[in-house]
Image (tube, helix red, strand yellow):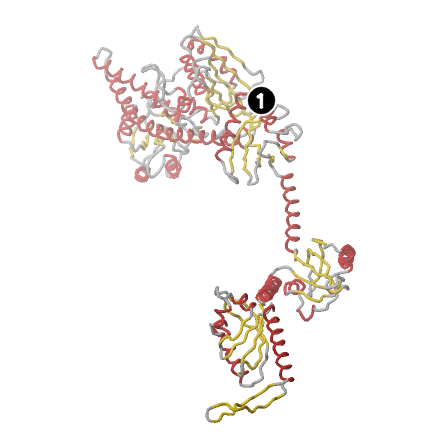
Amino acid sequence: GELTATPQIKKGRIVGASGIIRDVTDRKRFEDELRESEKKFRVLTETASSAIFIHQGGNFLYVNPASEIMSGYTREKLLSMNFWDTVHPDFRELVRERSEARLKGEFLPSRYELKIITKTGEERWVDMTVGVIEYEGKPAILGTSFDITERKRAEQALRESEERYRTILENIEDGYYETDLRGDLTFFNDSLCRILGYSGEEIMGMPNKRYTDEENRKKLYQAFNEVYRTGKPAKGFEWQVFTKDGRKRFGEVSVSLIKDSKGEPIGFRGIARDITERKQAEEALRAEKQRFEALLENAPFGLVVIDPQGIFQYVNSKFIELFGYDLNEIPNGREWFRKVYPDPDYRHHVIETCIQDFSISSPGQNVPRIFAATCKDGTKKIVRFITVQLEAGGYLMSCEDITLAQRAEEEKAALAEQLRESQKIEAIGRLAGGIAHDFNNLLTVIGGYSQLCLTDLKENEKLRGNLEEIQKATQRASDLTNHLLAFSRRQIMEMKILDLNTLLKDLDKMLHRVIGEDIQLTYLLCDELGKIKADRGQMEQCILNLAVNARDAMPFGGKLTIKTSNAELDETYAHTHIDTEPGRYVMMSVSDTGMGMTPEVRERAFEPFFTTKEKGKGTGLGLSTCYGIVKQSGGNIWIYSEPGRGTTIKIYLPRVDGSLEEPKEPGEAPEIFKGTETILVVEDEMEVRKLVAQILKGQGYTVIEASGGEEALKVARESTGRKIDLLLTDVVMPEMSGRELAETLPFRHPGLKILYMSGYTDNAIAHHGVLEEGINYIQKPFTLEALARKVREVLNRKG
């Protein structure tokens, strides 16, 4: 029981007591139970893994050991701290508001998640459950929390993983799919929709027969069955599908099994990669490879593929055709060099060149070279090799036979050189012809007047000797101009059908006298030699000039060979020899065993006045005269010579048909007849005109002078009452040629005879130096006797 006593005091002394005895058995039992309950609570809270705390107004009243572990603070520190300081700032206001509302009796969720701040400043997630209790007679907050940081991290990682997974599926080009066990689509990404051409709504649950054919369905089911049976994924099998618009697409598909939580198969998943472009590229590559192989085999040049070790990997058929060797016969570079370049020195040169080229070339760079290669059958060919270093290592080499092209280039160069020489000779010829023309006019005047002087002098006159020397010099100068005219092809030629063999036989004695006794002369004459048409005297001059040149090239004796033959010059020969027409020719060659010519001398040999002889030993007109005579006769002349190996000069003259014309025997010189006829002399050179007029007047003729065609026509018109018997006119004159004048005058003077005179001829009265039929002509310079005889001859001619 419980006794409550009150003392009784009288006069300051305790005299007794009064009290109440109360039965407290139930209360004692309750207190014992409470103490037991508190003991159990402490044991529970002190050993709990969750943090348990009580705070009142934010001040901690109780914290268990788990709270220390979770927060990092000691119990003493926590009891001195404010609860709000442990809450993360992002959640602090929310927790405060809820605590205050809860203390006011408002109903709020008792459990929520928030972040706290530990002693180290680390943020950690907790799952907190709170409630209101009475603590020491006042309401307080009892809370429990457990750390869910790792769970939160796992959830975040899962969310990130799912996000990555979703991002990957949404952004990969490959299609992702999931199907049920029947093969109907249950999940897919946008790429699969794009590949098949359907929208997401259309494709969901779509059976595969909608987008593939029976053959490819069988292939897919076989893969599904194999995966279902073995549990092992199938990778990379090819599959064909058809898009919504009917286009065929090629896919590369992988399949794996989907299992539920119990490990039971529930479907299939995999990746479908669109390989249409790759298949098209492969097909294009196959086609390109076929075209390339066809190109290699049908290339117009040889091709070789060589690996970095020098092993020949491939040769095409053109290579085999070109060299005669196949891959078994030349398996590597060593055998190639040994067989194709049998000469050791040349082989060494080729190898050194190739090594140098390879050392400085880079991949893809062409390295062209031209070598002389020996084929299997022993023939030699000029081959252009182009070697390309490949990016992957090794080399590709092309081989082109340029033997004919090389020869053509050489022929082209030779033709160009011949053309250049021909043009140079032609230019020199025009110059020489012009000089000869003017020079002949001067010689006509000098020779004519000196001869007139001689006719007036007696034999013992002192001046006679001087005049005779002038006559001799005039003759030598005339010979010189004749050479120039021959070179320029502007001399008058009397063309006759000749037998060259007969002409050579007639010249034999003279040739022996010319070359001397220490040179052996040999003839190799064709028995059935064709005939030519030429001026006999000019051809004799040409042969003698060649013999003299040969003699001078053999000062210590030697051998001179003259050969004749018939020749057929074809298109090929004409193509390589300028100014040559294909056809039948007579060939004459003059060969000596003399010192020969250098290329520089050979190039200038036909130039007039060019000579390698000492001063006074030659005029330099021998070969140039031959050149002009042959060219004017319609032929060609070529020089073949090398220093120390002699010289051969070949002349080709057109072969003609017809009867030989026997040379006329020269008769006795007729008496120089005089006359009384009237002669119209037309000459633009005043000195020549006066000389001719003086000579003719001295022979008794009446002479009318005119300086040109127009003046001659005027004189003729004014001479209507007087007959003009002969027109003696220069051929080449300004304004009007002698031929034009001769064609006009006879209309006014019927029966008029015509005689042309000129220092050289042009096409007015001759074609290529051959006089037209019935043309009367006298060559300047002429003598008094020659002019008087020719004038009388023309006047006496009937018709």
- Evaluate whether residue 194 shows in this view: yes
Which amino acid type is marked by label 1? Answer: Pro
Dot 1 crowding, Cα within 10 Å, few <14, some 14–19, many 20+: few
Nearest the viewer among 178 and 607 is 178
Query: How many marks do you count on the picture?
Result: 1
**Identity of the residue furthest to the top in this view:** 517
Relative placement, left or right, of 777 versus 156 is left
Q: Is residue 160 left or right of residue 456?
A: right
Residue furthest to the left in view is 462
Q: Which of the pair 682/96 is nearer the observer?
A: 96
Quick one: which residue is furthest to the bottom in this view?
A: 10
Residue 20 placed where, x, y %? 59, 90
Quadrant location of the N terminus in the rendered image:
bottom right
**Residue 298, quarter of the rendered image:** top right
Q: Is residue 303 visible?
A: no
Q: Position of residue 375 (x, y in %)?
A: 61, 26
Q: Is residue 27 above or below residue 680?
A: below
**Residue under the image location 49 percent in, 79 percent down:** 57
The quarter of the rendered structure image containing the C terminus is top left
Residue 318 screen position, x and y as percent: 63, 34
- SS label for mark 1: loop
Q: Is residue 66 above or below residue 286?
A: below
Residue behind mark 1:
342
The location of residue 786, given as percent across then percent down, is: 35, 21
- Decide which of 409, 720 is in the foreground and name it: 409
Residue 219 position by quadrant: bottom right
Vertical order, 282 against 529 (above or below): below
Left or right relative to 276: residue 674: left
